[in-house]
Every structure is written in structure tokens, then in C-alpha cells.
Amino acid sequence: MQSKFSLKASLLVLIAFAIVGTVATAQTYSPMAIRADKAEIVPAVSPDATAHFTCELRPFDLSKGLFCYGPAAIRTAYGVDQLLNAGFDGTGQTIVIIDAFGSPTIDADLAAFDTTFGLPAPPFFQQIHMPGSVPFDPTNADQVGWAEEVSLDVQWSHAIAPGASIILIAAASDNFDDILAAQNFAIDNRLGHILSESFGASELGLNASPDGQAIIAANEVSYKRAVEEKFSTFVSAGDNGVAGVFNGVIQRVPQYPASSAFVTTVGGTNLFFGSATNADPNGTYQGEVVWNDGFGAGGGGISSVFRRPNFQEHLPQAALNTLNGHRGYPDVAYNAGVVGGVIVHLGFAGLNGSFIFGGTSAGAPQWSAIASIANQVAGRPLGNLNKTIYKLGRKGALNTLFHDVTIGDNGFAHVVGFPATTGWDLSTGWGTPNAGFVQQLAGDDGDDD
């Protein structure tokens, strides 16, 4: 199995450059979406045509380029198709997505994505620009990057929960204060009970100054309030594995808000869905490894700020020894590979068409969509899911409800990472979801028993 999922060394990029290039500045967050190749669409030749893009049928050995997935493959891989077939699609729920700047074409891009894959429009979609927002500048690389993030977040939360409403709150900028203002706006106005956030910054960098410590403290107040208001908050774990830059040195650097105990943090995998050798939207789940494909790696690590939360106190002794009394993340995982990325439609800054995207940004909105379905099944907002997830893991229930990822590690830029192991680990958490998990989640009261 290990050799089956080996990835070509030719995919490796200039890793040190990538690390430096994606680290947020002293006062800003960075989005966690990675745009790769443009996807070549396949003209429809019959009403029952299944593959929309050439990359959906490519071999895993990369001999014909990057392979990719549309909604049908991802839904089947994680059992979402079973939920949809049973009538559970997020109806009555609202997913609130927090991003910076927004996108000038998100309505049209979502409509194009839906047309391509035969999806219905969401029952409600709105983009809210926070006060102080500026017009979109297609020559501004920062704004373009965030618009790409918006596209990934909106289109793929909708792909997984097509019956859920979506509200996109576009912060005035990616400054910490502006992002926090957008988050507080969502909580204050109770716009929904699910938050999706695909951004982060160096926890070490923030904690190194009084101003940064104040930013963490203010965010923790906000996240705690979200828990009290029964929000389920999903945050991307990061795209550089364990690595980051601190004091000019590439080293292990935990990410914030991924390290917060008030959020459910989503790590990354490379998903293999199709046949034994090829991607195929009509295929089956073949397996997953820790996302580490040369384009990036799934974030994960140990907080230098936060103590181990109660929900992690029953992890195996080996894991507790590694954590040494601190919060470890991620909690769960999802497909994030650029190798095996997802299709996203863009219509701005000359990027007209569909592209392959990866990054743990793909996981947070899709987990948010799964949570919206769980809320629908439960008939109530389930709120923060960590306590229930870890309790199910402790009882062994996730052995059949999750895909336990046990191959690979999240080392990056020559910084030694954490290996995947049986059960919970610091590269993929408990693993990736399967359909039965939603019923368990919806039927659990979160209390210990």
C-alpha cells in the first residue's frame, strides 16, 4: 500500500520559498487555498456523461498530470452521498464563512460551478462586506488570493450540503482586527450555527509580543462565546505541515487559530478514489495518506500557548507524553492534496475557468457542511463537536465511523513532522469522516457516560 500511494519526486517545489511566501505578515492572516493547474473540461457527449474534466480520470502515478475530484467522488468517498440519498442535505441550516476582501464574481462563479456539476442553487446565499471594505483590485495579489479562498470555501461547502444556506462575511482586510470584527459580527447577529475559517498565522509570532498576545486573548473570548452560542467552528490546520518561520529560522511553528481548543481543527490528506490505479468519479474509496505531496503538507502540532483541553485528557499515554500537557491539533482531517485536488470555478482577475485546488482550506468548509447536515439530522445546533468526537474516539466508535489514516507524516521544509498512527495523531487527528458518523454525532448529547 505504501508504494501504491507514493508520489513523484518531480512534484517537489522550492519548499523554503513556499514557507516564507505563505507566512502572514506581523498583523495579518494568510488564506490556505492552493491553486494549481487549470482543469480541462470534457464536452458533454451524452446526457449520462460522468466525467466533466480530464483530470477526473487520470492515473494516480501522475503520468498524465494531476488527478482531481468533483463533488460526486468526494461525496462517495466520505459517505455524504448516503446522507443526501436519505434526504439530509443541510436544509434549514446556515453555514457562515469568514474570509477577507470577498470576491467580485462569487455569485456567478457559484452558479457556473453548480451548472457544471448539476447542483441546485443554495436556498440562500449572501456576501456581506464589512464596513471599511475597499473595491476589489485584480492587480492586488493579496486580494486575488483571498478571492480564490472565497471561491473554494463557498463552492465546496455548497457541494457537500446543497440544501444549506450560505452567508459569506468579507472582512475589510486580512488584518487580525478586521477578521475578528467579521467573526464577532456573525456571532452577535446569530447568522447561523456553523463557522468556517480557512486562514491562520504563526502562534509563536503572535505570542512573542504583548500586541500579539492581546490578539490571541481577544480571539479566545470570541471563540468561547461562539461555543456558548452553540456554534460549530471549523478551522484549517495549515498548509506547511509542522514548519514555519520564527525569528528567521524554519522550524516547528504551531498555527493560530488552529491551536485554539474552542475550534475543531481540520488537517489534510491525499485521497485516492477510483480504481486501484486511476481516479474515477464512478469508483470507490481506495485509501488516504497524510497530505504531503510537494505542494504542501497538512498542518498539525502542539500549542506553545494553550494547555491540554479536557477533551484530550483520555488520549493514549504515548500521545499524552508527546503533548506534554499542551493542546495538540488537528482534531480531524479531510482531503487537502493538490495531488487529488478539487475543481473550483474562478471568474476574476483573468482567471476565467475551472482550476484544481488543494490546501486544508478545502477541509474546513466541507466539514462545516457535514456539521450542517448533522444539525439537520439532530434537529438542533450541536455546537462545538470536540468533546463528542474525542469521546467516540475513546470508546472505539470511530473505528467504523472514520477512515483512520495511518500512512505518512507532516514533515516539511526539512523540519521533522509527526507520523500518522492508529487512532488520533498530530497529522490527521482522528482521520476523515464516513456517513454513519453523522447519525452518531446527532444522537450524542456530548456528556460522558
Image: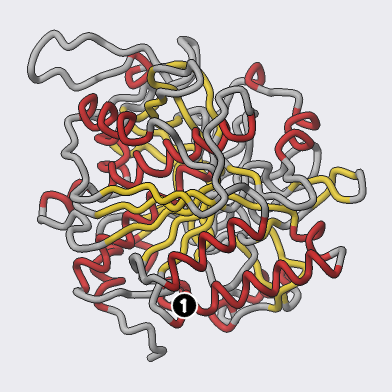
Left or right? Give the position of 174 relative to 373.
Answer: right
Q: Position of residue 45 (x, y in %)?
A: 13, 8
Reply above or below: 221 against 58: below
Q: Which residue sits at x=25%, y=50%? A: 161
Give the residue displayed 60% in from the left and 31% down from the top. Answer: 293
In this view, the residue in front, 123 or 71, is 123
- In the rendered image of this protein, does residue 61 appear above or below residue 418? above
* Residue shown at 62% from the left, 42% from the top: 239
Is 442 on the left-hand or right-hand side of 308?
left
Q: Which residue is mark 1?
A: 227
* Circle count: 1
Which residue occupies the foreground of this view, 192 or 385? 192
- Residue 196 rendering spot, x and y as whole percentages: 45, 56
> Which x, y percent locates residue 428?
54, 54
Q: Secondary structure at mark 1?
A: helix
Coordinates of residue 298 in the picture (x, y in percent): 60, 45
Q: Nearer the viewer, residue 2 or 360?
A: 360
**Residue drawn where x is 47% and y is 74% of the image:** 226
